[in-house]
């Protein structure tokens, strides 16, 4: 849904796309509560996209789909979408030093022991997740493993940043960067940081990686005259793949051996059985 939502951003403005866009923000929230900040991010991006044309169909669609979801969620589970969003937002806002003089000492926020979301978790958790988004080993469920290799992640960020200089890709790149940063900031206020909440960044960083390789290929084509960009890009990708394979040989071997030696039944399957 997230990739489709970004794809809709790239399509020409039309009534059909405006109606579809109205359903995407609340659909992301319905998939997982952790996607809550993306509702605001995608709604804002679509608002900018359809502001000059087809704004009314987008607003009507967003109101209808959000109302239907809120009503269905209340009838089925008894949850109130508006009160839930307001409760979390208000809890975070009131922790700011300017609103809570008694709750801050020397500019530091005091963390409530029963709070699931708190700004006091932000500095440490954001640093951890930011490292994870650059290919370092961080908490992933009960393990510490990178979501991408360090080289792929770093080149991915370089490609996303580099693309901001190109008019044709600026909107696409800005959307992906905004989504990643918004989700990272929000989940950094959660008491238990985990890179699985940021797995959606993998395809975004891979897109950025592809762009970075393309840009490097264009530079190399200018430096090494007579070589085509396509050949240079293929050689560069092969070199990176070989380096990645050798640098992760032990990790791949251990994963294969564990699966062969032990009964590695997926934990979610066991949970369903129990």
Image (cartoon, rainbow, N blue to C red):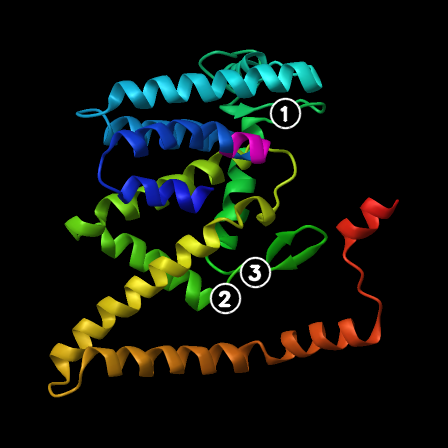
Q: Position of residue 257 (x, y in %)?
A: 75, 77
Instruction: Please give the residue where the numbered disc 1 appears in the rendered image.
Output: 111
What's the CA distance linking mark 2 and mark 1? 34 Å
Range of the magenta residues?
28-33
Q: CA distance from mark 3 to mark 2?
A: 6 Å
**Residue 49 highlighted magenta (yes or no):** no
Identify the residue at the far right of this view.
Answer: 274
Q: Is residue 29 magenta?
A: yes
Is disc 3 surrounded by few (<14), some (14 to 19) or many (20+) residues within 10 Å?
A: some
**Residue 248 appears left or right of 257:** left
Which of the labelled discs sits on residue 149, or is there none? 2
Report the mark closest to the observer, 2 or 1.
2
> Of tags 1 and 3, which is closer to the observer?
3
- Res. 59 image quadrant: top left
Q: Residue at x 31, y 32 (%)?
A: 16
Q: Residue at x 29, y 64 (%)?
A: 212
Which of 153/50 is in front?
50
- Mark 1 vs 3, N-terminal side: 1
Element assignment for label 2: loop
Which percent across, then down, holds residue 254? 71, 75
- Looking at the rendered structure, the secondary structure element under dot 3 is loop
Mainly helix, strand or loop, the magenta region? helix
Q: Is residue 22 above or below residue 213?
A: above
Q: Using the rendered image of the protein, determine whether residue 91 is visible from the camera's viewpoint.
A: no
């Amino acid at each position: 849904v997230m990739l489709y939502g970004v794809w809709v951003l790239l399509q020409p403005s039309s009534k059909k796309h405006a109606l579809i866009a109205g359903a995407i923000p609340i659909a992301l929230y319905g998939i997982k509560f952790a996607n809550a900040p993306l509702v605001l991010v995608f709604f804002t991006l679509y608002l900018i996209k359809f502001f000059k044309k087809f704004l009314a169909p987008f607003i009507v669609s967003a109101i209808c789909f959000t109302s239907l979801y809120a009503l269905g969620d209340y009838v089925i589970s008894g949850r109130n979408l508006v009160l839930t969003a307001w409760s979390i937002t208000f809890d975070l806002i009131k922790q700011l030093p300017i609103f809570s003089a008694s709750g801050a000492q020397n500019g530091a926020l005091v963390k409530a022991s029963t709070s699931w979301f708190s700004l006091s978790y932000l500095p440490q958790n954001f640093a951890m997740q930011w490292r994870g988004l650059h290919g370092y080993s961080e908490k992933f469920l009960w393990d510490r493993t990178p979501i991408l290799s360090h080289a792929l992640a770093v080149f991915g960020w370089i490609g996303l940043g580099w693309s901001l200089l190109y008019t044709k890709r600026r909107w696409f790149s800005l959307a992906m960067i905004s989504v990643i940063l918004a989700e990272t900031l929000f989940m950094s206020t959660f008491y238990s940081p985990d890179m699985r909440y940021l797995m959606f960044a993998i395809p975004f960083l891979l897109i950025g990686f592809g762009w970075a390789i393309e840009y490097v290929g264009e530079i190399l084509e200018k430096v090494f005259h007579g070589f085509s960009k396509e050949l240079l890009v293929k050689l560069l990708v092969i070199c990176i793949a070989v380096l990645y394979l050798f640098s992760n040989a032990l990790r791949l071997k251990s994963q294969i051996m564990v699966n062969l030696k032990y009964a590695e039944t997926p934990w979610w399957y066991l949970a369903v059985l129990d």
